[in-house]
Image: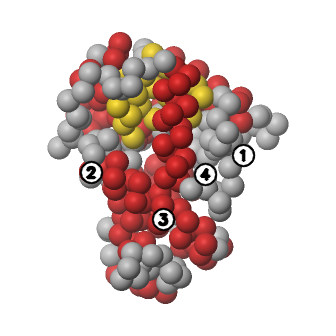
Amino acid sequence: MINLPDVNKVFISHSGGMDSTLVLLLAIDKYGKDNVTAVYANIGHIMSGDINATKDDAAHMVFNHMSSLIDVNSVIIEDSDFQSVDIHEADMHNMFAKIRDIILLKSNLPVETLPLFGITKKEKDIIDLQRLSVSADGVVQTIDIDAIEEEVANNPEKYSGVVNAYGLGNIRKHIPELLSTVYSKFSKEMIDEAEAGQAPIFNLNKADIIKEYVSRGWEDIMYKTISCSKPVDNLNCGICDLCNERKRSFENAGVADNTVYIG
Ligand SMILES: [Zn+2]
């Protein structure tokens, strides 16, 4: 069940991927396109297979691609001061709040415009995993890799998204400080957003999301969303971790994957 809040205007933090695009479409459906603004906040996440592409090129690529698919009012934040943010230092809570402020300032959106996020069950699962390493007073101490591995191994269904997207190899490779920073701050913020009704697909996994597109007849747009970390010419590469997660999600949903992959 997907519930969108009863408000007049929203903006969607939109990446061009499957999750946030579903929220965008749901919002247009509910509020009407004149009341929905899609925002691509360029925070330094490089989304381009062209090694020479700048972050702005990548942002424009996603923006132009998606706005050609979906007729919606859109804004790009090009000069966010988060473009060079170091994730190790990032305070994700403040980051969200500041992105919102920048968006509101630059776009002259009315202050009653509510931000919505494409936060999914995968993030919820990560929050659950994080709790394995939280002490009684709620502070993340040391990430207990063995405990996480055991939990994931014992519940492969539940954590499939987490394992696919992040990989325990990645957890080992990246240092615990990164995890504790991101998990403790970002996950708290995500729970707050979800509980405030600002994360309409919080209870859906990737397969659920695919089924939702199909049930609403939005497959054409779904197949053109970009999951990839290294897309070229608006096409998913088909070989990166995120593309593999995408492929597995179609399998799990029992839906044919008509995505055009480069590789
Ligand atoms: Zn890819």
**Rendered location of residue 82, percent (x, y):** 65, 43
Q: Is residue 39 visible?
A: yes
**Rendered location of residue 213, percent (x, y):** 30, 35
Does dot 3 land on a helix, a strand or a loop? helix
User: Sequence-wise, which precedes: disc 1 or disc 2?
Assistant: 1
Res. 84 mark = 1
Does dot 1 land on a helix, a strand or a loop? loop
User: Sequence-wise, which precedes: disc 1 or disc 4?
Assistant: 1
In this figure, which residue is indicated by the disc labeled 3?
Answer: 183
| Mark 3 or mark 4, whichever is nearer to me | 3
Quarter location, residue 26: top left
User: Sequence-wise, which precedes: disc 3 or disc 1?
Assistant: 1
| Quadrant of the image containing the C terminus | top right
In this figure, which residue is indicated by the disc labeled 2?
Answer: 195
- The kind of residue on which mark 2 rests is Glu
Residue at point 26% right, 21% down? 8
Residue at point 36% right, 83% down? 136
- The kind of residue on which mark 3 rests is Tyr
Residue at point 60% right, 28% down? 77
Does dot 2 land on a helix, a strand or a loop? helix
In the image shown, does 206 or 75 lie closer to the viewer?
75
| Mark 3 in CB contact with mark 4 (< 8 angstroms) | no
Pointer 4 residue Cβ closer than 8 Å to ligand 1: yes
